[in-house]
Amino acid sequence: MSDMIKLVSPVDGSVYLERPALTEAAVAAVVSNARTAQQSWSKVPLDERIAYCLKALDALKEMNDEIVPELAWQMGRPIRFGGEYGGVDERTRYMAGIAEEALADVVRSDRPGFNRYLKRVPLGVVMVIAPWNYPFMTAINTIMPALMAGDVVILKHAAQTLLVGERLALAFEKAGLPKDVFQNIVLTHQGTEKLLGSGAIDHVNFTGSVAGGRAIEKALAGTFASLGLELGGKDPAYVREDADLEYSIDNLVDGAFFNAGQCCCGIERIYVHESKFDAFVDGFVDLTKQYKLGSPLDEATTLGPMANARFASWVREQTQEALRKGAKALIDTSKFEADKEGTPYLAPQVLTNVDHQMSVMREESFGPVVGIMKVKDDAEALQLMNDSPYGLTASIWTEDQAAAASIGDEIETGMVFMNRCDYVDPGLVWTGVKDTGKGAAMSEIGFHNLTRPKAYHFKVEH
C-alpha cells in the first residue's frame, strides 16, 4: 500500500489534498520510460523542442485564473499578487531566445588539415526537486532549459505544492510534448533518496534547505551524477550615505516582506550608514505598518500566512531570542489581529539594536522579520555582509556605481545588485557560494550546466 502525501493548507489548517507516493516498481518504470524517451527527444531539432516549451507556456497562461487561488490554498500567497506567470514567461522566453547560441558548436579553426569542434550534448535524465515558495518559477529555471537542451525531466515537487507538478504536467500534455519527456512524480523522502542512489539519474537540481542539500549529496554519493544546489540564504542590503532614501525604503520593505518573507533572495538583514539610519528606520517602520495580514483569498490582504505553522514558529523563536539579547521590536504585532501564536499567520517585524550574536542576523529566517544595523562606513558594512555562512545575493543602495562595483567585488555572494533586490535576471547566472550551494541556472551558463561538452578531433589531411 502506498504512503499518502498530505498537503495541509496554511489558510485554515485543513488537508487541502493528498496523493499516493509512487511504489518502487512505479519509480523504476518512470526512469526506464524517461531513458527511452530521451533517445528520441535528443534528436528532435532544437527549434521544435523550443516550440513545445512555448506551447506549454501558453497552456499555463490559460490556466492562470485557476492556478492563483490554488497557490493561495497551497502556500499562502495572496491572490492579489496574481501568481507567478509573469516570471515564468520572462525566464522561458529569454532562455528560448539564447538557446541556439548557447548550445551552438564551438569550432577551432587554428590548425590547417584538421576539423576540430566542441558540441554541447544532453546529460540525459534530469531530476528537478522543487520547493514550495516560488513553486513554478524555481521549477521552470531547470525544466525549460533542460527540455530545450535535449534532456528529459522528472519533477518531484514539494509536498506543500503538489498541484504545481500536476499543472506543469497538464501544460506539457496540452502542448503535445512526446510521452515521458516530462514526468511529474510524488515520492516520500525515503523513496527520493533511493531513486537518487540508484544511479539512474544523470543530473539533479535541488532548491531547499542546507540540510536537504546535504541529504541529496549523501544520497547521490558514488553515482557521479552532476548536481545543482540552491540552498539557504541570509541576503543583506547596504544603504549608503548617498542612497535615495524614499526609493530604498519602498524597495527594501517589499524585498523583506513580499511572500511573507519566503523568498530565496529576500532581504533578511539591512545595514544603514549612520547618517541615514534614523530616517531610514522611521520610514521603513511606517511603511511596514501598512501591511494587511489575513487570508490570502481576500483581495485586500497584502501579507498572507507562512506556508506552515512550523516555519512561523521558527521566526517567532528567532525574534524572541533577539529581544532577550537586547534587540528592540518596532512593530506592535497586536495591531495585526490575524497574528496568532501556533498558526502560520505572523505579523511583520522590524528589529533594531541587533548584532551578529543573534540568530536573526546570522541564520536564515525565511519569514517576515528583518534586523537593521547602523554602520559607520563601507568597510564595516562589507565586513558584516560577509559575516554569514550563506552567499546568494547582496544589494547596495547608492548613486555611486563605481563604489557599488568596488564593494561588490569584495562581497562573498553569487549576485550583487545596485538599487534593486529580490529579482532573478534570466540573462545573468543564478548561483551562490558557501552554504548557499553550487551549480548555476539561467543565462548560457544554465544551458552549459544541463549539457556536457563533447570534443570532435578529425584529421582531414594525411
Image (tube, helix red, strand yellow):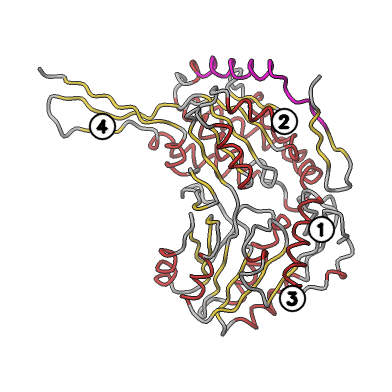
Residue where numbered disc 3 is placed:
286
| Mark before the other along the chain sequence, 4 or 2 | 4
Under mark 1, the amino acid is: Thr
Q: Nearer the viewer, mark 1 or mark 2?
A: 2
Residue nearest the viewer, comparing 20 with 456:
20
Of mark 2 and mark 3, the one earlier in the sequence is: 2
Q: Secondary structure at mark 4?
A: strand
- At label 2, the amino acid type is Thr
Left or right for 257, reference 139? right
Judging by the rendered image, the residue that carries numbered circle 2 is 188
State which region is magenta. Answer: 18-38
- Sequence-wise first label, 1 or 3: 3
Rounded to the nearest angstrom, the CA distance separating label 4 from label 2 is 46 Å
Amino acid type, label 3: Asp
Which residue is at 46% across, 21% downward?
A: 42
In this rendering, which labeled residue sits more in front, label 4 or label 2? 2
Residue named by callout 1: 301
